[in-house]
Amino acid sequence: MKTVKFQMEALTCPSCIKKIEGALKKQKGVQEAKVLFYSSKVKVIYNEAVVSADKLQGIITKLGYPILSKKVA
């Protein structure tokens, strides 16, 4: 398992959390997805054999949320 953290532009509403977390959790290979509203950060634990960090980033940006930075651990 790997962890990726995304720094996003400021989130404007708490419903953004449900939208982002829901989309990420539907992705095969994602074990956990957590959005921190006040810091506009997303942490995803995923199986790198099933899904890539780039794919996860694409899911978020397709929802309309720009990513400022990505850190894979």
Image: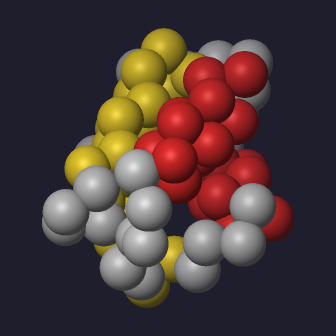
- Residue ID at (28%, 56%): 37
Q: How far from the left and from the top, in percent, is residue 47?
A: 55, 22
Q: How is the image coloured?
A: secondary structure
The image quadrant where one finds the N terminus is top left
Q: Is residue 66 visible?
A: yes
Residue situated furthest right in the rendering: 62
Q: How far from the left and from the top, in percent, is residue 35?
A: 36, 45
Residue 20's place in the image compared with 11, above or below, is: above
Q: Is residue 53 visible?
A: no
When asked about the image quadrant of residue 40, the answer is: bottom left
Residue situated furthest left in the rendering: 39
In this rendering, would 13 be left or right of 50?
left
- Residue ID at (51%, 47%): 15
Q: How far from the left and from the top, in percent, is residue 16?
A: 53, 53
Residue 1's place in the image compared with 59, above or below, is: above
Q: Front-most of 66 and 45?
A: 66
When asked about the image quadrant of residue 38, the answer is: bottom left
In this rendering, would 16 be left or right of 56?
left
Q: Front-most of 28 and 40?
A: 40
Residue 24's place in the image compared with 6, above or below, is: above
When asked about the image quadrant of residue 61, the answer is: bottom right
- Residue ID at (35%, 35%): 34
Q: How many marks?
A: 0
- Residue ID at (70%, 36%): 23
